[in-house]
Image (cartoon, rainbow, N blue to C red):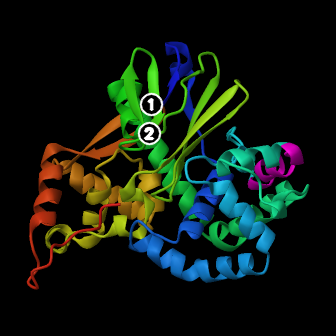
Amino acid sequence: MGWWQLNADTLARSRFVISPLAETFACLKLLHAGQGAHPGEHAWLGAHRPAYRARLAADPVTALLVRAGLGREWIADFLTPTPRGGESLAEEVARVRAAAPGAARAHLRTSLGGPLPDELDRDDLPERAAGLLEWVWEETVRPSWERRRRVLEADVVARTARVSEGGWASVLDGLRPGGTRWLGDSRFQVNLHEYPPREISGAELVFVPVTAQRSGWVSWEERERYAVVFPCSGVLAGAGGRAVPAGLGALIGAARAGVLVLLGSPMSTSQLTAVTGQGLGSVGRHLKVLREAGLVERRRSGRSVLYVRTGAGDALVEAGRQRRDPAGLASGHDDC
């Protein structure tokens, strides 16, 4: 397994950031794999993968570059510059474009685990990679970026609240189940590959959520900045997270039930508004009723007021999921 050694100060200074490029690269990986993790991703692939395949068919060099860069165990470093937070897509892509051609070729040899194909022995690889990332952004990410960004923000708020409640160890264990894990003794497992450990004490450490559910990678800049990219909570990632058990919807109303289902993780009113598509006033009324019924409770995390289900709310949602509809099919949303 690959793990990083870090001291308490490095972990305490770590933070979550949102990166348009990380989201774009995660979508590139999803487009290339062609395998969605839930119905929402399947629909997205159906809408965008034909155009992606056509673009690569028209540009064989870039198609080969993508296959080489994604690798089986290692992504070519120049494709995933470490997010810094607060940068635009253009600023992040500029760092891909600025990669030295020789370094890009060396990174591809590492991701391939062998020699570079003759077709990729050229100096325009960073420009080609940057152009493809810009295309993925414009065609497949930017039209839904506002919704995606709010989903990512909701995930960050929920995980920040968990840090306050259970410390960083509880959050690190859940970033990528089976992949990331706090090992104790200042050791953080970042993947399952047999790579040498890295000492990162004193560096900047950032955690970056993306909506694609099978995406995740690590990146770093020299020894100054490290990043762990991870899939955001499944309940937030796709439209399926808004579905509710039919019986629960009939009992308390579909819109109110949708709010209750989402509150398995702490969320603010504004984030609930973004994820559900309901108006701020409607969400506020639903929260008031659910609080008065003892199904949700309110917590404060820094300047944010967060809502989360109580034990009674959990029991009600779980009962609704286990109940079967007249056709004998379980109600509820697909787990991501």
Residue where numbered disc 2 is placed: 192
Q: Which residue occupies the foreground of this view, 230 or 154?
A: 230
In the image, farthest residue toward the bottom: 327
- Tell me if 15 is positioned left or right of 136 in this view: left
Q: Whole-percent x and y of residue 76?
A: 69, 48
Q: Whole-percent x and y of residue 52?
A: 66, 76
Which residue sits at x=48%, y=60%?
274
Which residue sits at x=48%, y=43%?
156
- Tell me if 228 is positioned left or right of 308 in this view: right
Instruction: Specify whether residue 293 is in view.
Output: no
Tell us which disc is closer to us: 1 or 2: 2
How far apart marks 1 and 2 lie (CA) works out to: 8 Å
Q: Which residue occupies the foreground of this view, 304 or 261?
A: 261
Q: Magenta includes 123?
A: no
Q: Whole-percent x and y of residue 163?
A: 40, 29
Instruction: Specify whether residue 140 is in view.
Output: yes
Which residue sits at x=27%, y=59%?
261
Highlighted range, magenta: 89-102
Residue where numbered disc 1 is placed: 189
Q: Whole-percent x and y of residue 74?
A: 60, 46
Callout 2: helix, strand or loop?
loop
Q: Quadrant of the C terminus?
A: bottom left
Q: Amino acid at mark 2?
A: Leu
Label 2 near label 1: C-beta < 8 Å?
yes
177 is higher (above) or lower (below) than 273: above
